Amino acid sequence: MGKIDVYPTTAWSAGTGCHGGCGQNLHVQDGKLVKIEGNEDHPWNQGRSCPRALALTQYMYHENRITQPLIRVGERGSGKFEPISWDEALDYCEEKMGGIRDEYGAESVIFVQGTGRDIGGPITFLAYSYGSPNWVQLGLSGHSCYTPRLGAMKTTLGEFAVADCSQFLEKRYEDPEWEAPEYIIVWGQNPPNGCPDGFYGPWIVDCMQRGSKIISVDPRNTWMSTRAEYHLQIRPGTDGALALGMVNIIIEEELYDKDFVEKWVAGFEDVKKRAAEYPVDKVSAITEIPADDIRAAARAYANAKQAAIQWGVPVDMCPDGTAVAHAISCLWTITGNIDIPGGQVIAKPAFGVTAYPFTSEELADLYGKDLVERMNEKRIGADQYPMYKHFRGWAQPDVTIEQMETGDPYPIKGAWIQTANVIGGQAARAKFHYDAMKKLDFVAVIDLFHNPTTMALADIILPAATFPEKNSFRSWWTPMDSIKKRVQVGECRSDWEINFELAKRFNPEGLKRWDTVIDYFDERMEPSGMTFDELEAKGGWAMSPEGPGRPYRRHEKGQLRADGKPGFNTPSGKVELYNKSFEEWGMDPLPFYTEPAQSEASTPELFKKHPLVMITGARSNLFFHSEHRQVPWLREKEPDPTVEIHPDTAKEYNIYDGEWVHLENDMGHIKRKAKISLKVKPNHIQTLHGWFMPEAEGAEPNLFNVWDFQVNQIIPGPQNSKSGFGGGQYKTTLVRLAKIKEDA
Amino acid sequence: MAKYGILIDYDFCTGCHTCEVACQQEHNYPVGLNGIKVTEYEYQLANGKVKIDYMPFLTDLCDLCMSRQAEGERPSCVKHCQTACMKFGLTTDLTAEAATRPRAALHTHVPK
């Protein structure tokens, strides 16, 4: 046995699977990872770790991991694959994708990813080099994950903002500039259970230990909500009404920050008028939260010297998620909680470095003017949904799957699926996705394990690397981290390497200035004045220096605008609560509330039949979405898919704890093990998504028993607002419970 | 007797299972064996509000990570705890510290 070397790195995606950012130390012996530990020198997690990171050796060296490229040799779904070489695999992809491009146009191949993480760079690199504008989180109805929130912030504030937990300061909680938020509104999230969107969930707990009080907006009772000063136990999907109601109270009672509003807010009077349509009694009736609690929470937040809001994906999953995010952002704006210690801190990528280009100029330079023109002409949904055209370069997921089925206005023939288990994961109407995708001429899946998607659809599977096996870098939001390859498992390659090589085949001219992915990283990292190797030599992380990338009060110092004048990065220099971009795009310029598509109020007949609101999509420390069920140390802690049922409801349905039951509606049913729990209200049930059984038969028709357990097969399809962003019905679908009848 | 112990400020234990997997990795314990285990209790207060508490306890499979101590490292569960609610030390020191916390538990432990 050789000696053990310890290498610091940053955990980001495959392996832990998450949005990442933790400093971890890799203990490597004889070319193999033998242990992983939190890195105490890294400011993000300060030595801490999580179950998925600590179980990494079981994940990386799992006997069922795919470690060679595989080509399908039987019928689609037969589960018959054979190993081939990387050259053969990439030749195959090049030939098939080239054929579709010649016959139908490059837009007929879609490029599918799961939740963001580190895939945006590699997947757009390939999609755009190939010539397709269709990059999509296929199945994620309404793209209901962070994009609605980002859209609302960018168009009003000109920036993105996050709860300030000192994450932009090297010394963290010890930095004298930082102050703990007096209150944190934890809106639709259980932060100890996960690390979303460039944010380490336990930071909220760190703040609590330093005096922050919590206002929890959550339909469930969680560790966090039961320690909150105010728990607003909201009816799922009604967050927009609550936010507007709180805005109204704060304005009516003159608790807002008059100086800040005077100096830095445009459209205050318009918001005041709109919010007045949401008096507290009306809001209380909509949200099922007592009016006194809403008042008390609004007052506590507004009266705090500094207070922050940490929000989660339920905001996006409300009908008109973008408008809901807009409403919530009004709270921190009118109370002046922006760009101050312990408020919302303006979040910019470290050193202004981004992993991949965004601007039309950069895109034209790399991929040609033609691609940029086709982005808006051919991108699916861009003609229907203005935000897809103007805000972010996605194809609209609900429209994409409809188009796959109809072939109108052009056929979709191929899919490159990377970091996404569409069939077993994010796809609302999962069976509709399955049926539509079965008809594709070409499907490549890039993954680490077999799952329902590889089994049902893949013609070819390319084995991806975990973070200890790859070179990468991260600048979202802070610090900037280098991720250096330390071990090799089988023939696995990083997403960057796979896509870089294939992209070069499709676009040799545009990409010729880089020989390796490190060359590309070095160019992206130029604004930092460091190369990849230089950052690695410094310990693998660095934070933005004084300037636009470092808090606080940048709007007063003239650090946010290109012209160097004080103010925010908007046309008026103010936070534009009256959203002119939305107005220009044919949307409501002011925030508003929409009732969920299924509810007692909107579908009373359906409600009689299916009286329980099913909440899905919570986070688990053990599993990242549909991953990790095959890891023994993790699965042991939660072996079965459960459904939380209130004791009164269990009694009504005559269900005992531990009984296997059906959750059903007009779309079908799924199986869950009953967990009688006070975590949910009597009229709600809660269940985790992403379940399939990796230990079961993978070939059709089983597909790892996905159709027994995939909750998203009973989640309906689009309820898209005018923006096309938000409204996936993952938290508001009506169901009923049913006992499972034994076969006679 | 019990020279060392682990103080757990259990009001901040969120039940995340990190300590359990940290222990299993450190000792290479297979599924079913663990030096630490987290329990959960849901209950209703007199005012009707629901409360959820978590509490990790040490088992006979805990050796207080003796081999890590020799290298100046804390036990793996303590180091990796996501909310930093665990502290390793001399029971005499921890007893004093426990008295300053509203809801803490001191686990004395003599490895078998």
Image (cartoon, rainbow, N blue to C red):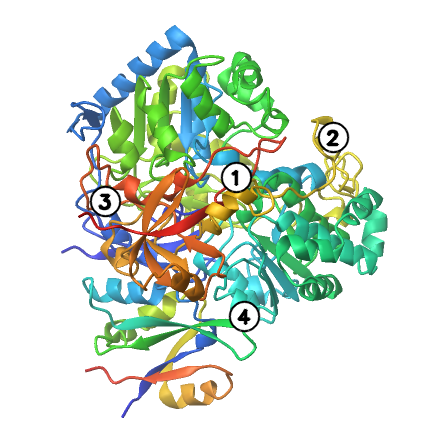
For marks 1 and 4 on the same chain, the one whose residue lies earlier in the sequence = 1
Q: Which residue corresponds to mark 2?
A: A583
Q: What amino acid type is highlighted by mark number 3?
A: Pro
In the rendered structure, which amino acid carries the disc numbered 2?
A: Glu
The first of marks 3 and 2 along the sequence is 2
- The residue closer to the viewer here, A299 or A191, is A299
Q: Secondary structure at mark 1?
A: loop
User: Disc 1 residue type?
Assistant: Ser
A237 with respect to A438 (left or right) = right
The verdict on a common chain for dots 4 and 3 is yes
Q: How many marks?
A: 4
Q: Which residue is mark 1?
A: A144
Instruction: Locate residue A552, reporting x and y percent.
Output: 69, 54
On residue A694, which mark appears? 3
Q: Do the residues at pointers 3 and 2 share their chain?
A: yes
- State how far apart marks 1 and 4 are (Cα): 28 Å
Q: Chain of mark 3?
A: A
